[in-house]
Amino acid sequence: MNNADTIRQWLTEHQITEVECMIPDMTGLARGKIVPCHKYDPAEGLRLSEAVLTLTVTGDYPEQDFTSPADPDMRMLPDPATLRLVPWASEPTAQIIHDCIDFDGKPHDLAPRNVLKRVLDLYRAEGWQAVVAPEMEFYLVEVQPDEDIPLTPPVGRTRRTEAGRQSFSIDAINEYDSIFDVIYDWCAQQGLQLDTLIHEMGTAQMEINLDHGDPLDLADQVFLFKRTVREVAIRNNMYATFMAKPMQGQPGSAMHLHQSVVDAATGANVFSNADGSPSPLFFHFIGGLQRYLPAAMPFFAPYVNSYRRLSRYTSAPINLSWGYDNRTCGLRVPHSSPQARRVENRLAGVDVNPYLAIAASLACGYLGMKAGIQPGEPLAGSAYEQPHQLPRHLDDAIDLLANCAPLADVFGDHFIRTYSAIKDAENREYFEVISPWERRFLLLHV
């Protein structure tokens, strides 16, 4: 049975009436079309303007046109592995992630999902299989439609907001049982492999981890997880926000990424020698992260707001020191068995496009392994006492990315130029905004 027949059979068995045909855009939002099931042909797929792949987060486009001036279509072809029910739909509705394909049959080079596949192909060519496990932090907040009013924590089942920070509090999580019960149920219906749930440092800040596995599948799961959590929250008269720094005086929200690499033939972790000691590839992977992550920052901190999270003493990295079980470092190596040896990249905010953040982290590690890059010495003390090593603002990060030839070779020059232009357009639009702080302290005082 081919892919199209597999999809048709699944749609029939589940008595589907509508199909949500999705692609992740540069921001990581779902774009596409909703089609009546009887009109959906999975063999043919759909057509969508390729300009969708150059949208900024505000719905605009960069000044330079990185697609054809004729504004052509591209093909959307479904990936049957991503076929799932939409748990909150009132009628039987399917959702399926599509791949963006040019009409000559080649993967579209601006599609984030294709970019991740491109990186995974590099691993495959070396006989390697990357393994990742994302950890996602987010806040629950009161519904506030006025953008000028700061966000506030929501009221829980006791009809009160949290009193201060409640790190790892079971009772604080139970305040929102009605939300998390539905999140787990709906994620289970979609095959999203949720692991632990904890209360993070911030007020009404939560963290949910996903089981480790294939990077493309995990990126799909993060993409769907965000959509699901937002839907559950709004149905409970709250917002769930994945902004990196949504509230003043509160910690930011990260998407920590655990990464390891196994031999595709044997399944053995290539980060460990036969005697269980760390292998040269393990150190080279860290070396690649240390060298190239600064240039890859726009994938891990994609918005102006993202850089508010990356400040000293806030459980967020300010440099790329690495250490064993050292959470102050940008790169942490958790205690583990040799087979589970891994590197935790703590740089990414949860506001990232998961496809691009995972691709960028694996790309940096790949470049390190291929070139035999040696890392610095592991840090035993606090990395917060070390100097800043990362771009402090989005415009600086864009410049580094646009001038990094090794990353352009991995991602494709067209993609890097387009993504840099999108981020530059967003940054320039933000720069036009006059903030309440400026009006409060400068209006009559300077």
Image (tube, helix red, strand yellow):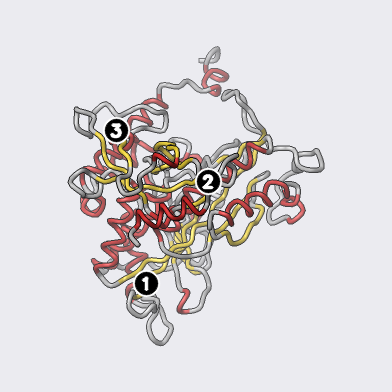
* Amino acid at the residue labelled 2: Lys
Left-right relation of 111 to 337? left
Labels 1 and 3 touching (C-beta < 8 A): no
* Numbered mark located on residue 206 in the image: none
- Which dot, 2 or 1, sits closer to the camera? 2
Rendered location of residue 160, percent (x, y): 79, 39
- Number of other residues with Cα within 10 Å of mark 2, as a class: few under 14, some 14 to 19, many 20 or more: some
Residue 226's disc is 2
Q: Which residue is mark 1?
A: 282
Tell me what residue is drawn at x 45 percent, y 73 percent.
341
Q: Nearer the viewer, residue 343 or 41?
A: 41
Is label 1 or label 3 in front? 3
User: Which of 441 and 283 lies nearest the eye of the viewer?
Assistant: 283
Quadrant the N terminus occupies: bottom left
Q: Is residue 335 left or right of residue 172?
A: left
Nearest the eye: 271 or 33: 33
Residue 118: x and y, percent?
A: 27, 56
Q: Which tag, 1 or 3, sits closer to the chain's start? A: 3
Mark 1 crowdedness (10 Å alpha carbons): few <14, some 14-19, many ≥20: many
Badge number at residue 51: 3
> Spatial distance from mark 2 to mark 3, Cα to Cα?
24 Å
Residue type, label 3:
Ala
**Which three-letter amino acid code belongs to the residue tagged 1?**
Phe
Q: Residue furthest right?
A: 158
Q: Secondary structure at mark 2?
A: helix
Q: Secondary structure at mark 3?
A: helix
Please tell me which of labels 2 and 1 falls first in the chain. 2
